[in-house]
Image: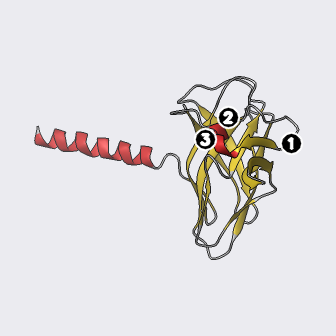
Amino acid sequence: MRILSQIVLALALTAGSIYAYASDYKVGSVMAKHAWARVTIADRPAAGYMSVHNMGGDADRLVSASSPMAERVELHTHIMQDNIMKMRRVDAFDVPAGGTTELAPGGNHLMIFGLKHLPKPGDMIPLTVVFEKAGSVDMQLEVRKAGHKMKDDDHSGHSEDGDDTKHDSHSE
């Protein structure tokens, strides 16, 4: 009976460790971790987030992303200009040597336009991200429900042509 308990415990710990690393994606010296997406409502863009770690000695850049489940994916950032928060499309995110770049609500993020269907929390959105030096890696963004509505996560004002979206900085 004791051996059976130890086997069950070992299997449970193994399953837990597999789950813990299920969201880690590595290509070259770059690893993307904790990839997730927030979907608001139908016909609105979703936002994708992750932590990108560069374990190498040379800087790299995240230069593009795509998904078979979306019309297009763009790299976006927030900037404060004249006391107004603006969202802007960018060409790349720098990933410093030995450093980390966070894609997170209120900062750098992926905008996922034209989802073919509205995923529910717990669903996965397939995504390919491309790094300038490390190359491309396929991953899954876990769809999560918003705990509370955050103005900078509401991309309902985003236009399909990528124009700036202005937010009152006091409503953040």
Give residue 95's quadrant in the image: bottom right
Of callouts 3 and 2, the N-terminal one: 3
Alpha carbon separation for disc pair 3 and 2? 22 Å
Tag 3 secondary structure: strand
Residue that protrudes farthest toward the right in the picture: 161
Callout 1 crowding tier (Cα within 10 Å): few <14, some 14–19, many ≥20: few
Image quadrant holding the C terminus, namely: top right
- Across and down, in percent, residue 23 comes to 53, 47
Relative vertical location of residue 116 with respect to residue 32 in this rendering, above or below = above
Q: Which mark is residue 140?
A: 3
For image coordinates 76% across by 33% down, the residue present is: 70
Residue 67 in sight from this viewpoint: no
Residue 73 in sight from this viewpoint: yes
Alpha carbon separation for disc pair 3 and 1? 27 Å
For image coordinates 37% across by 42% down, the residue present is: 15
Q: Which mark is residue 163?
A: 1
